[in-house]
């Protein structure tokens, strides 16, 4: 059994596949996985032999987002400790979004919370029909702050407002309609689809693609600066340590209704 939380493979064409490897935890991320993934992303970005980066996952789920047991522990920490932790997540997502190589999210199963953020931060996304999506934070008395710039950029403010507020689950067809997913395929077509798309990218100039990514970031997402990233981290740190945030996480882990639900 492989105990590594993040697996990496680079093929002869320069395609690097990062695989989240906590299937028993639905690939939820904790501090260890975050630090490992950040290190992998930085290493691949600096490797001139890597041309395309594919983000995949083992098991039934793509990613359940943040590990709730880890977040529950963080709720008992100070605001400063919570902020440092939130900044680690913010740094990882920002690094993924700003990678100079084109990135493809390969979504084979459910993506919740921060898992949706990972998909939104990639340049392209391929999903199977059985994948489902949910921005579930408000059900726990929390907010999807750190991932918000990437989700808004992917699906627009109006749709983001709906799914942030309702925490509804939506299927892959809706994710495709919203623009979160670019290609929707059957389960047995997933690998073939990513192979085909990555080969298309390999035909393009590496420096030109890096310049295009920087261009789009500046023209479309010029607001995505360090101050905004820090602000999103502060917002989630405040909510995690708040009375409502602690109650929401405790209620979920104890399999009971939170105090704000009456009747």
Image (spheres, rainbow, N blue to C red):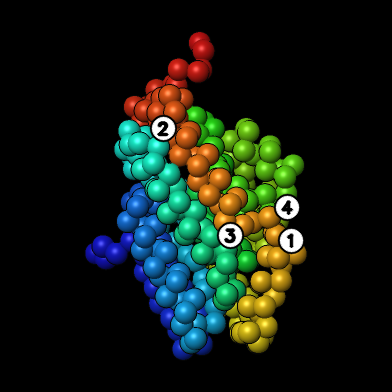
| Residue at the disc numbered 4 | 177
The secondary element bearing badge 1 is classed as helix
Residue 112 in sight here: no
Q: Quote the CA–CA distance across marks 1 and 4.
A: 20 Å
Q: On screen, 159 above or below 215?
A: above
Residue 92 in sight here: yes
Q: Position of residue 101 (x, y in %)?
A: 57, 76
Q: Quote the CA–CA distance across marks 3 and 2.
A: 26 Å
Cβ–Cβ below 8 Å for labels 4 and 3? no
Q: Quote the CA–CA distance across marks 4 and 2.
A: 36 Å
Q: What residue do we see at 45% from left, 71% from top? A: 42
Q: Quote the CA–CA distance across marks 4 and 3.
A: 17 Å
Q: On screen, 76 above or below 16?
A: above
Q: Report crowding for label 2: few under 14, some 14 to 19, many 20 or more residues within 10 A (C-alpha).
A: many
| Residue at the disc numbered 3 | 121
Which quadrant is home to the N terminus? bottom left
**Residue 220, numbered circle:** 1
Q: Earlier in the sequence, mark 4 or mark 2?
A: 4
Q: Report crowding for label 3: few under 14, some 14 to 19, many 20 or more residues within 10 A (C-alpha).
A: many
Look at discs 4 and 3 and give the one toward the viewer. 3
Cβ–Cβ below 8 Å for labels 1 and 2? no
Look at discs 3 and 1 and give the one toward the viewer. 1
| Residue at the disc numbered 2 | 241
The secondary element bearing badge 3 is classed as helix
From the viewer's perspective, tell me whether residue 124 is left or right of residue 29: right
Q: On screen, 242 above or below 179?
A: above
From the viewer's perspective, tell me whether residue 3 is left or right of residue 198: left
Q: Position of residue 110 (x, y in %)?
A: 51, 50
Look at discs 4 and 2 and give the one toward the viewer. 2
Q: Earlier in the sequence, mark 3 or mark 2?
A: 3
In the current view of this chain or complex, which residue is farthest to the top? Answer: 263
Q: Earlier in the sequence, mark 4 or mark 3?
A: 3
């Amino acid at each position: 059994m492989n105990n590594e939380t993040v697996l990496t493979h680079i093929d002869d064409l320069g395609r690097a596949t990062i695989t989240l490897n906590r299937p028993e935890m639905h690939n939820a991320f904790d501090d260890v996985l975050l630090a490992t993934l950040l290190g992998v992303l930085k290493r691949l970005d600096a490797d001139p032999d890597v041309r395309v980066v594919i983000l995949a996952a083992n098991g039934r789920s793509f990613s359940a987002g943040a590990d709730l047991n880890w977040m529950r522990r963080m709720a008992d920490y100070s605001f400063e400790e919570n902020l440092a932790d939130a900044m680690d997540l913010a740094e990882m997502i920002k690094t993924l979004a700003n990678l100079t190589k084109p990135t493809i999210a390969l979504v084979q199963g459910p993506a919740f919370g921060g898992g949706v953020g990972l998909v939104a931060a990639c340049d392209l996304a391929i999903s199977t029909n059985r994948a489902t999506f949910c921005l579930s934070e408000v059900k726990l008395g929390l907010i999807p702050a750190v991932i918000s710039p990437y989700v808004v950029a992917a699906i627009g403010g109006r749709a983001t407002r709906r799914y942030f507020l309702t925490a509804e689950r939506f299927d892959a067809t809706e994710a495709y309609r919203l623009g979160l997913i670019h290609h929707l395929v059957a389960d047995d077509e997933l690998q073939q689809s990513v192979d085909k798309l990555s080969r298309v990218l390999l035909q393009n100039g590496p420096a030109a693609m890096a310049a295009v990514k920087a261009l789009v970031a500046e023209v479309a997402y010029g607001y995505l600066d360090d101050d905004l990233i820090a602000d999103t981290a502060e917002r989630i740190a405040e909510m995690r340590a708040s009375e409502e945030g602690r109650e929401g996480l405790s209620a979920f882990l104890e399999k009971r209704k939170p105090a704000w639900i009456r009747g």
